[in-house]
Image: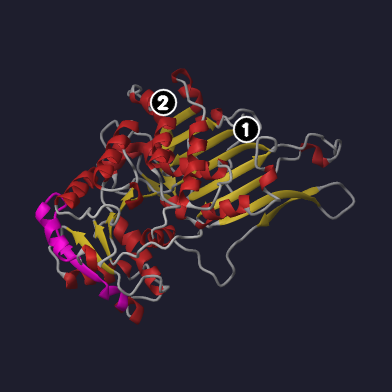
Amino acid sequence: MNARHEPQLPCTFVIFGATGNLSSNKLLPALYHLEAAARLSESLSIIAFSRRPWGDDEWRSHMREVLAGKIKDGTDTPVFSRFLARFSYQQGDLNDAASYQALASRLPPPEACSSTVFYLAIKPSEFAAVIHNLEAVGLNRPRGQNRVVLEKPFGEDVESAHTLNQLLHQHFDEEQIFRIDHFLGKETVQNLLVFRFANTLIEPLWNRNFIDHVQITVAESIGIENRADYYDRAGALRDMLQNHLMQLLTVVAMEPPAAFEADALHDEKVKVLRSIRPIAKRAVHAHAIRAQYARGTIDGRAVPAYQQEEGVEPNSITETFVAAKFYIDNWRWRGVPFYLRTGKRMERQTSMIAIRFRLPPQQLFRETPLESIDPNWILLSIQPDESMRMEIYVKQPGLDMDTRLMQMLASYLKTDEQPLDAYETLLLDVIEGDRSLFLRFDEIEWAWRVVDPILKHWAVEREYIPTYPAGSWGPADANRLFDSDDQAWRNEL
């Protein structure tokens, strides 16, 4: 996405947790599409590391099975055969140093290979074991060479995030650490930077003088999908808002970076997070609400309540919905509320940034139908489709001053173009050594600091949690966050 330096390309890509859901559903399809696009170097080999007692043949049969319905051209093509040939399989236990020694024996020596990528497609609780064992067999050396990729969440609060960061920095330099937030790899999020900073039409309006408020919604129609062991400890605030939604907020609110490169982008995002007004203990209730889904219906199918999901603790008060209000106290955004909302078992799957403009200062069209005109919006859809829309009013043809709402669609895809999956973009950036779309630790730290008052307040409220029907847009109580009666959640494009 930006002007790149020329780092050395890795010659080996190791996937820890290769048989897990993340690898099967995201990493393997993305790597295949990079293969089909001829973006992987011929010398790159990929090692799948997992507990299952397999050899190379069993692993490749597994790849055919999991990718059969996920790639357009099927598995009986020269491209897929070439992709299979890159792989070998290493059976191993994440807690067994001997498994890492066996892995090390399959890697080329440092003098023959520029670097190795270690992708931790595993539970966060297993990060420490992998990092320690990589160090035990020397796979973190020489410093500054190999790369390690971690999925969120990065800790459970400020303190645990610091502990994880200290562990990483004991064994790797910051330039070797790639912390993934896959939302930053989505085309709409990257296009937002272009939309703002490459168009003089837009940037002068992007401030408190013209914008009334900003809404960021990530709604999921699915439940916890057999992730109760993780989700029942994390909840929606840790799982989604602290990382995905807070990153979207920084991209919307950041100032133009000095240059379009990794550190300059990170610097501006951190400035936004540091400018967010701290939430006082007594004000948490006015700034954040939580709820949990009850029984309901989605797509005509009855679904159970959260507490009836397999693996969930009885009488759990883990939130599956959270909505929060933040203010950014700087020259651009002072007084503009940012409303963030995410939940599971919502009416439909959608992710959207909705920006509402202020009403014109003069009601020019009094005593006409235009007197009650609604404000303009800019709508940035992230999923299920990726698009940018601007709503404006125009006069309808006829004798009366009647209007209709028009949407100007700024589509960046031509009819013959296919959208990229976020992981394709991010994996290519890992291989090429571009950290622009990855997180620096101070971003993570300040995002935790922003939500820390909410976490601490909810930690002592352990007796009751309100509910909302599955298949709805969440609890009605979320509306109390709005600063004025004319503000409401935007659910549809």
Estimate the x, y position of residue 396 in percent, counting from the top left.
81, 53
Instruction: Magenta stretch: give its range.
Output: 82-107
Q: Going by the picture, which residue comes out furthest to the right?
A: 399
Estimate the x, y position of residue 418 in percent, counting from the top left.
51, 68
Say which element carries label 1: loop
Disc 1 marks a residue whose amino acid type is Trp
> Relative to 251, does residue 3 appear above or below in the rendering?
below
Per the image, the residue denoted by label 2 is 453
Estimate the x, y position of residue 474 in percent, counting from the top left.
48, 37
The 10 Å Cα crowd at callout 1, few under 14, some 14 to 19, many 20 or more, is few
Labelled disc at residue 331? 1
- The answer to whether residue 116 is magenta is no
Looking at the image, residue 129 sits to the left or right of residue 326; the answer is left
> Which is closer to the viewer, label 2 or label 1?
1
Q: Residue at point 36% right, 22% down?
A: 461
Q: Is 445 in front, or is 125?
A: 445
Q: Residue at point 72% right, 40% down?
A: 374
